[in-house]
Structure formats: C-alpha cells, structure tokens
Image: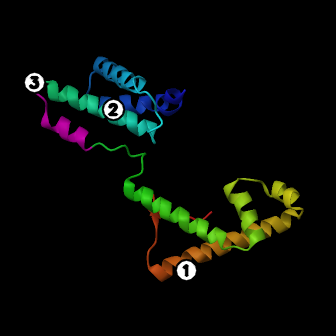
Amino acid sequence: MWVAREIVPHEPRIRAWFARRRVAPDEVDELMQEAYCRIATLDTVDHIDCGHAYFFSIARNLLLRKLKRQQVVPFEAISEIESFRDTQTPSPEEQVSNRLAYERVMALIAALPERCRRIVELRKIEGWSQKEIAAHMGMSEKAVEKQVWVGVRAIREGWSASEKSTGIAVPVGGRKVGIL
C-alpha cells in the first residue's frame, strides 16, 4: 500500500530522468526492478519521511554503481548524476524557513481574540465553510465573514510589523509567504 501511494506515482519521473541520461530502455527496466527490490527488502518504511526522494536516491545510486562498474564512462555522466537533486523536495534551508513561517503565523493566530481566533482556525485551518461555522457557533454567516476578515487582516498586519521590525522577509519557494 505504501509503495503504491509513495513510490509508483513517481515512476514516470524516474524513467524520464534515466532517459535524459541516455540510459537504454532495457537498462532502465533493470534499474527500476532493482530499486523496487531494494524497497521490498526493507523491514519497515517508518524511517522514510519522503518516499519519492528515498526512491530517487536508490535509483540514482544504482545508476552510479552501474556506471562506475563500466570500463569506459563519460565523465559528464557521473558528474551530472552526482549533481542531481530532487527539485520537489525542499532543501533543508527551505524546510527551516517554512517551519519558521508556520510558527510565526501560528503565533499571530494565537494572539487573536478567542472568538476571532476560533473562527479563523475553523475557516482557514480546518476548512469549514462559513455556513458550518455559523451553525456551530450560533451566529450569522455575515458575522463569521467579518470575524474571518478581521482575523486575517490582523495576521497580515502582524506579519508586516514583524518583517519591518526584524528587516527580514521569510521567503518560501522563491516568494514571500502569503498569509491565509
């Protein structure tokens, strides 16, 4: 089940990656089979945080070993493979930046007045509709809409004030973090 969810959807990307490195189709099949065998021999996958990145690493290492065993290998092939990084997996710096931005937003939400905070959490974090929140909290949809607006505005203002006081804008994915 884990393999079907975490690995199989990324197989076409790995095959395309092999093709860009001019690996013959029959060799691609062998490398893919070996990569799946490596996953199958694991006792548990609990230690794997990002399945597709783990699988890419296995495939990359298998290709490196194969190239190193060959008698003559173009130098570019090895250097190109060694520089490969899965672009969908955030770098450690991006992960830290994302975590700091998340903590900042959560602190700003926690600073909201109780009712406003709860409404913003239900709407923006838990994904409830305004109608559901209104029924749950015994208020009109218009009042819910206003509380969401007030809360989001306070969060944006808090974020801007924080950036001005520190002089640091937290980038996420190459752009400034958008608030809710």
Viewed as shown, does residue 175 lie left or right of 66?
Answer: right
Q: Which residue is mark 2?
A: 58
Task: Give the residue at the far left of this rendering.
Answer: 71
- Give the residue type at disc 2: Ile
Q: Earlier in the sequence, mark 2 or mark 1?
A: 2
Q: Earlier in the sequence, mark 3 or mark 1?
A: 3
- Give the residue type at disc 1: Ala
Q: Is residue 72 magenta?
A: yes
Q: Position of residue 171 (x, y in %)?
A: 45, 65
Q: Secondary structure at mark 2?
A: helix
Residue 37 visible here: yes
Q: Which residue is mark 1?
A: 161
Q: For residue 173, what is the image quadrant? A: bottom left
What residue is shown at x 69% (from left), y 73% (from top)? 112
Colouring mode (rainbow / by chain / secondary structure / one colour): rainbow
**In this rendering, the label closer to the viewer, 2 or 1:** 2
Q: Which residue is mark 3?
A: 71
Q: Position of residue 32 (x, y in %)?
A: 36, 23
**In this rendering, the label closer to the viewer, 3 or 2:** 2
